[in-house]
Amino acid sequence: MKDLRAIALFALVVMLVPALSASGVMLNFVMTALYACLLAQAWNILGGFGGQFSFGHALFFGTGAYAQAILQLDAHLNAWLALPLACATGALVGAGVGAISFRYGLKGSYFALVTLAFAEVFRIVALSVPFTGAGVGLMLPLQSSGGAMQFESRAGFVWLMLALVTAGLLLTAWLRHSRFGAYLQAVRDNEDAARAVGVNPLRVKLLATVMSAALMSAGGAMYVQIFQYIDPGIAYGPHTSVEALVGAIVGGMGTLWGPVVGALALHILADLTRNLFGQLPGINMVIYGSVLILIVMFLPRGIAGSALSVRTLWSRTSERRDA
Amino acid sequence: MTALLEVVGLSKAFGGLRAVQDVSLQVPAGSLTALIGPNGAGKTTLFALMSGFLRPDQGRVLLAGQDITGQAPHINAALGLTRTFQIVQPFAAQTVRENIAVGAHLHLRQRHQALARAEEVAHQVGLDSQLDKPASDLTVAGRKRLEMARALATRPRLLLLDEVLAGLNPQEINEMIPVVQGLVTQGVTVLMIEHVMQAVMHLAQQVWVLAQGQLIAHGTPTEVTQDERVIEAYLGHGTAARLKAQRGVA
């Protein structure tokens, strides 16, 4: 299948980086870029394919991060064992929040507000209960070994992040070619029409939330492994939610490559402006913001979405030529 | 003929507006039955009550003898009851093929099977040349066909068609009538809401007439169009008498 071949090619190209380069800067760049891709992919499952715009995906990110840290600190679990459990915890929170929101038919801006509110509630709770370390946060003890998922070289993290991003790509490709994906997009485009032909929208949206949350929690768990630290602001603050949704929107919602392209483009842009205008504090954010506005204005369907329409336009004109 | 769909004493009020009042009707299996009535008579509300989009205040809906009152639309679809919408509801961002495949997925898990079935159904309703167009590019007539195709792809036993001919020009109506007829020959029972009387006269074996939320007449198309209550409901109080008088003079 075309999608699978493209994913394999992508994975191979990214693999070349740690294989050929030992430069810390390069590896760090690829690692953080992949990390941004992962967050955007997670958001894209629910927001892009399901049309449910979450403004609080940090909820799942933070839950994954705290679960990853707590399972190691309190339950003394190995990091590799903690990772799937952290994803499951995030998925469970996704199921809970999804059930509450969708059961009462929340859509559009109301769903966005509810997810934002849940993320804030979790942030405040994490600030006040003891097992999250409250305001101080949690710190993982430094163990530079792959067995503890704290690699000596950034290359280890590049491999791991690549595996997760590839998993995200495969999940997204499955959405494009499966009954569940067709149902999810049908519910996004017209819920009543979908119900009339036998789709249970509650079930479909709930499952999409669970998948999206699981992937987002993996992002949170990776954050903890990379930086060995988490606090309520990082975990549940709006910054992560925005990063996830902007990447997917800029790249193109509901597409396979949109989140990857968008997150990568924004990541490069942020890096460039920071390096070029480092001596003028704040100017990088101004430029970043301006470019963002331009993209949203002139490419409302995102980079990948617009590329797609150029392609259909081209194939249509060539059809006309052939005719 | 046994009734595939039976509605008993169905009522629904929206605040002070009694949209459907104590409606009882039957749709015989294998028939093409029409539901007509002036604007605002409650026809679409009745459809919503039958298909599960709205829950009735009173009364029961039976599909092949099974009580499905207030049951969610997706469960009804699985039982073989599907509806179309008067205001067409395409999945606008998706192609015609993908739109129809959503319906086909009800009984086909595999994507390639559903897409193949979509092609067959598109052929049946005359959409085969548009399969790869986005649904948003279709004309009104095309969208009405799509609406039918998507419902048909679920392999319904009973199809509720809500004004599939509304907004079409005479030629498009003439093209659409055989498509609707084709459904019945295939063994699908059809209940259609329709304003285009030409089509109702031509297609329906029996007609139910709804006015102001109540059934006022039932019979063959010819019987119904001569019914005084029906004429009055459409043309206003006293019209039947006036028409009769005019006919007497002439």
Image (spheres, rainbow, N blue to C red):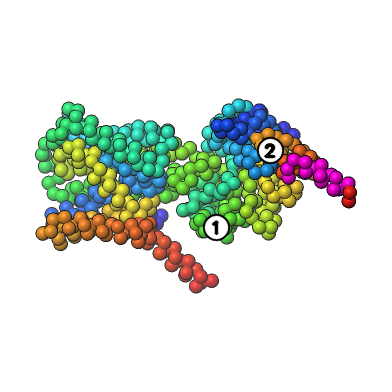
Q: CA distance from mark 1 to mark 2?
A: 33 Å
Is B104 placed left or right of A312 in the picture? right
- Tell whether position A233 is magenta: no
The chain holding disc 1 is B
Residue B99 x/y as whole percent? 52, 50
**Quadrant hosting residue B12:** top right
Q: Secondary structure at mark 2?
A: strand
**Image quadrant for the C terminus of chain A?**
bottom right
- In this rendering, which labeled residue sits more in front, label 1 or label 2? 2
* Residue B220 against residue A4 in the figure, above or below: above
The chain holding disc 2 is B
Residue at the disc numbered 2: B211
* Residue at 65% from the left image edge and 35% from the top image edge: B213
Between disc 1 and disc 2, whose residue precedes?
1
Q: 10 Å neighbourhood of mark 1: few (<14), some, or many (≥20)?
A: some
* Residue at 30% from the left image edge and 39% from the top image edge: A116
Q: Which residues are magenta?
A: B235-248
Residue B60 x/y as whole percent? 62, 28
